[in-house]
Image (spheres, grey):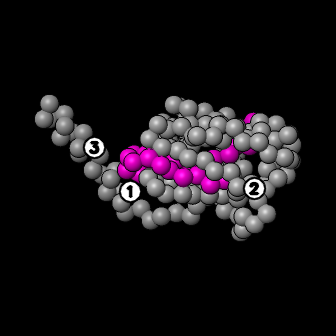
Amino acid sequence: MKVFSLVCLLAVVPVAVSAAQTKPKAAGTQAKSSKGARTVELTGGDTMKYDVTSIQAKPGERLHVVLKSNGTAPKIVMAHNFVLLKPGTSALEFNNAAMTARDTDFIPPAMKDKIIANTGLAGPGETVDVTFTAPTKPGAYEYLCSFPGHYQVGMKGELVVK
């Protein structure tokens, strides 16, 4: 048992050291101003779920999405973001690619063109936001948290444009 614990500790330490050396990144695709935008507030916590799983918007409406992390687990193991995908994008494929994109806050560079809007990562007590224009085409647009494991347990929702 002691050997197993030591192996687990040695596996985690390089990740923790690497994360501690990472500089904070910008909070996603920020607009210059949220003025004139309707604010939508979401929270995410240690349960890996958004408290809001459906957002209604009018075609072309300006939205200011504010995501607050109310969890207590350390950011290295429990951070949240908001990623709104373009239609036709497989959320599962996006999420699978995101798992290996730690250096870019779990936003896969090869799939940035599949994103309408996204925030940076929020750790415990942190808030991130993004302002964007809702699509002009009515429909349902999926959003998700791209932090590893969160999409798989249901940290997702949809923006319904009508």
Give the residue type at disc 3: Ala
Residue 160 image position (x, y, % from top left): 77, 39
Nearest to the observer: residue 103 or residue 42:
42
Label disc, if present, on residue 11 of the rendered structure:
3
Q: Earlier in the sequence, mark 3 or mark 1?
A: 3
**What is the residue that sits farthest to the bottom in this orientation?**
32
Give the residue type at disc 2: Arg
**Residue plotted at (85% across, 40% down):** 162
Please say if 107 is above or below 35. above
Report the residue marked by disc 1. Answer: 19
Nearest to the observer: residue 130 or residue 147:
130
Q: What stretch is highlighted in magenta?
A: 65-89
Label disc, if present, on residue 38 of the rendered structure:
2
Q: Position of 131 compared to 9: left or right?
A: right
Give the residue type at disc 1: Ala
Whether residue 127 is visible to the viewer of this picture, yes or no, is: yes
Question: What distance separates the C-alpha of mark 2 from that of mark 3?
Answer: 44 Å
Residue 65 image position (x, y, % from top left): 66, 53
Q: Which of marks 2 and 3 is nearer the N terminus?
A: 3
